[in-house]
Image (spheres, rainbow, N blue to C red):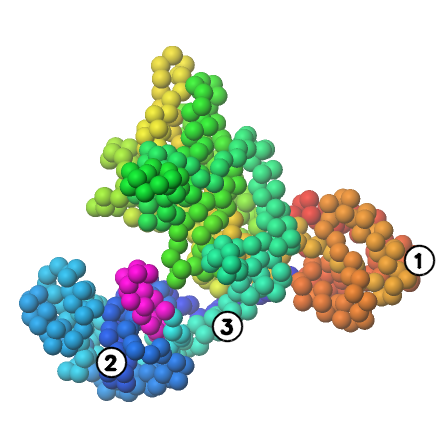
Amino acid sequence: MVQSAPSAEAIHLPKTSESDRLKRIRHTMSHVMAMAVQKLFPNAQVTIGPWTETGFYYDFDTPEPFTEADLKAIKKEMAKIIQQKLPVIREEVSREEAQQRISALGEPYKLEILEGLTEPITLYHLGDRWWDLCAGPHVETTAELNPKAFDLESVAGAYWRGDETKAQLQRIYGTAWETPEQLAEYKRRKEEALKRDHRKLGRELGLFLFTDPVGPGLPLWTPKGTILRSTLEDFLKQEQLKRGYQPVVTPHLARVDLFKVSGHWQNYREDMFPLMAEDDEARGLEQGFVLKPMNCPFHIQIYKNELRSYRELPIRFAEFGTVYRYEQSGELGGLTRVRGFTVDDSHLFVRPDQLASEFLSVVDLILSVFKALNLKKFKARLSFRDPASDKYIGSDDVWEKAESAIKAAADTLGMDYFIGVGEAAFYGPKLDFIFQDALDREWQLGTVQVDYNLPERFDLEYVAEDGSRQRPVMIHRAPFGSLERLIGILIEEYAGDFPLWLAPEQIRLLPVTETVLDYCNQVASQLQALGVRVHVDQSGDRLGKLIRNAEKAKIPVMAVVGAQEAEAGSLSIRTRATGDLGSLTVADLTKRLTTAIVEKLPHL
């Protein structure tokens, strides 16, 4: 059913963060590109040019946008520079010296970058022909760069400093590797990624769309896409009910004061949609309403509505709650980065003595979800705070308790994990699940967070066994994470070939002639009554086209129906996963279909 992933023997493509040598190669290659651009386009001004996980980019301010022909010319010039075997020379200069040299070049962006640098100020030269402000690292000479192991990939718009009110720049993306074989493998995977691109497949399969009148980052779900969403939601809702979760529903917006108490307004404001105030005075006083970026403050209000007893805990509230984040337009990407998305959010209010067992139970739920979705390649990240950063709320003692609890749980489970310093939420540390897809790309899906801070900020209590008032601990968790991102990932992981239980259309009946339509509709009604998602193709096309259309739509099961089948009360079954199954009675097919769907088998 699922398109084959790259073989285990495929060439390993290390990320920049995994290889110091690749970091130096890619960073130097960005300088080579900037030098080539300024030689071919003398009016181009450079801004920043960092490495990325698979290559590099540089932002330029140019009078005219770059074309595909320009990229070819730039690449050719880069190869010439590499072959000149120029030394890469590091130079330390004073701020005044750097300012004089930059002013002489007439590079205003470099002057602005210089203002934010601390000494020593370092320059990197490519021979005696070109230089830029840079902290490194770089290779020692361009002779270490392979002219057959890099490529220029695309041009995109980018705002200076990521600010839409500032100048629009031209960003050239490139990729660089140690060997031509790595470059070839990278290109092969990119081609495969294009075939699996959820934006392309989502459009072809009729699952979702984006429109200009609605706005970027705000997906519209078609009937088929909504069935896919609902199937995933129903699956998790049933799992949660089995585990003692209580469903709740909360509004899409609230008074800004709610988020001032939680700390989101102070710490997350740039990612929130603007304040909706009744007048300018209220806006100045920061009074009014905001679209919610998180569901947790709402669940806290439900908890706080009545005094809780220690006997009631743990309390587990769950909601598929839509939240809104004001992502920059350049950061949007199909379903994986949107402005309005649904989180399978739950907040557990537990006694301190219940924290360990509840945390382990949540992880067990997440792992069972991954198993049902056949997501096997993932790793765990313990997302802790950066002690040097001031973006986190709460005391050191509270953070140490929360981080220790997460680490203890991961150790108890024997999980293979790594620690991500600085990856914590502003209110608490997390256990994040990083999924690796069929093309070795990484995505964050499920997350579990331990939070001592919000119960403190909202003054949450419960009555302990001795009659005293005690503070509960909160666990934030989301097995799916963003439902939109999950669906985007699943589309690409399955290449659109959803497992039978998840497919929006599970079986399509293909009538050979109009005379068997009544029989087809009777069979469809029986299947629909049992919850099977079935469709009768009444287009009147020839059988060959009926089959091709069903294949193109990636329908898991097809049933060819002719006069012989109608007379015998049978169906000729063909599946995408296993091919021709021959003739089955309606009763036999019904039993096999419903069993496979209930047991969440990948195919019939």
Note whether 477 is above or below 309 in the view shown.
below
What residue is rendered at 90% in x and 62% in y?
515
Residue 436 in magenta stretch: no
What residue is rendered at 81% in x and 48% in y?
525
Q: Which residue is mark 2?
A: 43
Q: Amino acid at mark 1?
A: Glu
Magenta-highlighted residues: 157-176
Residue 168 in magenta stretch: yes
SS assignment at label 3:
helix
What residue is rendered at 56% in x and 36% in y?
240
Q: Main secondary structure of the magenta part?
A: strand
CA distance separating discs 1 and 2: 79 Å
Q: Is residue 280 visible?
A: yes
Q: Quadrant of residue 464?
A: top left
What residue is rendered at 59% in x and 63% in y?
203
CA distance separating discs 2 and 3: 35 Å
Q: Amino acid at mark 2?
A: Asn
Q: Residues within 10 Å of mark 3 (few under 14, many from 20)?
A: few
In the picture, measured across the screen, residue 415 lies left or right of residue 598, that is left
Note whether 579 is above or below 378 in the view shown.
below
Q: Which residue is mark 1?
A: 567
- The disc, 2 or 3, on the residue closer to the chain's N-terminal end is 2
Residue furthest to the right: 567
In the picture, measured across the screen, residue 182 lies left or right of residue 120, that is right
| Label annotation for residue 191 | 3
Q: Residues within 10 Å of mark 2 (few under 14, many from 20)?
A: some
Q: Nearer the viewer, residue 575 or 94?
A: 94
Q: Confirm or deny contact between disc 3 and disc 1 (CB under 8 A).
A: no
Q: Where residue 68 sits: x, y (%)? A: 41, 81
